[in-house]
Amino acid sequence: MRRSHSRAMMISLFVIIISVFNFQRLTNSDCIRAIHVITLLVIGAAIGVFLSNFFALIIQRKRQQ
């Protein structure tokens, strides 16, 4: 079970890094385009997945001790 949490955390961290890099490269930030909204939603969802798996991993470690 711990391996699935770690794998999900690595995948979501990879998505976060790619999305943040893509968001920083976008030009014309004076007007909000659809790609800005989609990129921010992906970053938020990936952060949510990362945090939920991180806390699940911590809880699982505490239960094993």
Image: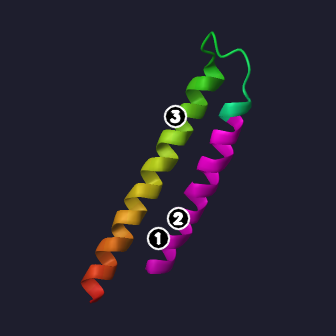
Q: Is 9 within the magenta?
A: yes
| x 42%, y 49%: residue | 48
Tell me the residue that label 1 is attached to.
5
Identify the residue at the far top of this view: 31
Tally of numbered discs: 3
Which mark, residue 41?
A: 3
Quarter of image, res 27:
top right
In-image side of 7 versus 28 (left or right): left
Give the secondary structure at mark 1: helix
Marks 2 and 3, the one that precedes in the sequence:
2
- Residue 29 at what x, y percent from top left? 65, 16
| x 48%, y 44%: residue | 45
Say if 39 sits above or below 2 in the image: above
Marks 3 and 1, Cα distance to the nearest angstrom?
22 Å
Q: Is 48 within the magenta?
A: no
Q: Are marks 1 and 2 in contact (CB under 8 Å)?
A: yes
Tell me the residue that label 2 is attached to.
8
In-image side of 40 versus 62 (left or right): right
Extent of the magenta region? 1-22
